[in-house]
Image (tube, helix red, strand yellow):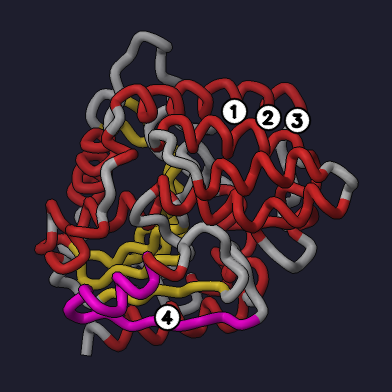
Amino acid sequence: MEGDLLDIRGKRLYVEIHGDADAPALLYLHGGPGESCYEFMLHQSLRLSEKLRLVGIDQRGVWRSDALEEEEALGLQDLVEDCEQLREHLGIPRWSVLGHSFGGFLGVLYAGYYPDSVECLVLEGPSFDFDKSFRNWLQKAAPFYQSIGKPDKAQECLAAAHGSQSPEETLQAFMELGQGLGKLRMKVYTPNDGNNYNRMLYSDSQVKEFGRRSGIHFSQLIAEGRIFDSLLPKLKDLTVPTLLIKGRHDPVICEEQTQAFVRDVQNGQLMIYEESGHLPHFEEPDRFAADVIQFVLGTRQ
């Protein structure tokens, strides 16, 4: 898989495009903050490009995009504006947007700011409220600590899940307790073989540099603080057709967020994947591709 570096608002962004130029365009927004489009493209580029023109990016400062300097400012609005500038650069009048996890959060923001640019929105395991997502993840992580004989850590998970601390403190607990699980961490996200979902085609030194870049991206968004603002009140303002794909075992989009989507999104549709966790595009890839294609094409009729 190879992409191009395109100059978008003063930074080169890594962009991959798959599919016929005349097919309906679909922008993929990866999670994190600080992940990459790499893993999604590995599993879905061939499937989705049969009917769609799939556009994937490494967000500003992430992985194969130009690195950010540690003193360089970065905010959520930069990521939104990058999406819109990329659409204009590629000459796409309107496109659909597929956001995974944090990418779903970003997709909701983008569709809110630029509804005339977005035909429809697909949200895969999104977070609309990161504090609620972190707490739900910690709740689900507790049994894994029990399974490896660390009941004290299990209690720490539960205390953070139900405590009165700030969102920033919940994030800190999530990061520390997640790191403590080691390879079991991915099992919280998916009941399937989550530790084998990613084939790495880059060298160790490249991966180390990618991690450094993503760390700066993540830190700058955390420092800005807007990522801790809940999007739940904004769901009622979404005007584009929106599909929520949720794995039954997903720890990120908790039941409260799911019910808010069902209640408040004007033109929303919910699909539950019974065998999936946070990664339906990997866990049930054929169904995922078929559902996304059908929804995107259906909104154009």
- Whether pointer 2 and pointer 3 mark residues with C-beta atoms closer than 8 Å, the reply is yes
Identify the disc placed on residue 203: 3
**Mark 1 element type:** helix
Residue at horizontal 62%, vertical 70%?
249
Disc ID at residue 293? 4
Is mark 4 in CB contact (under 8 Å) with mark 2?
Answer: no
Residue 235 lies in the magenta stretch: no
In this view, the residue in front, 239 or 300, is: 239
| Residue receiving disc 1 | 210
In this image, 135 relative to 74: left or right?
Answer: right
Q: Which residue is mark 2?
A: 207
Circles 3 and 1, Cβ within 8 Å, touching? The answer is no
Q: Which residues are magenta?
A: 257-274
Q: Earlier in the sequence, mark 4 or mark 2?
A: 2
Where in the figure is residue 285, as x and y percent of width and height? 62, 74
Q: Amino acid at mark 3?
A: Ser
Disc 3 crowd, CA 10 A, few/some/many (<14, 14-19, 20+): few
**159 left or right, relative to 246:** right
Residue shown at the point (41%, 12%) measured from the top left: 69
Residue 216 horizontal/vertical position (percent): 47, 21
Q: Are marks 4 and 1 in contact (CB under 8 Å)?
A: no
User: What is the C-alpha distance between the residues marked 3 and 1?
Assistant: 11 Å
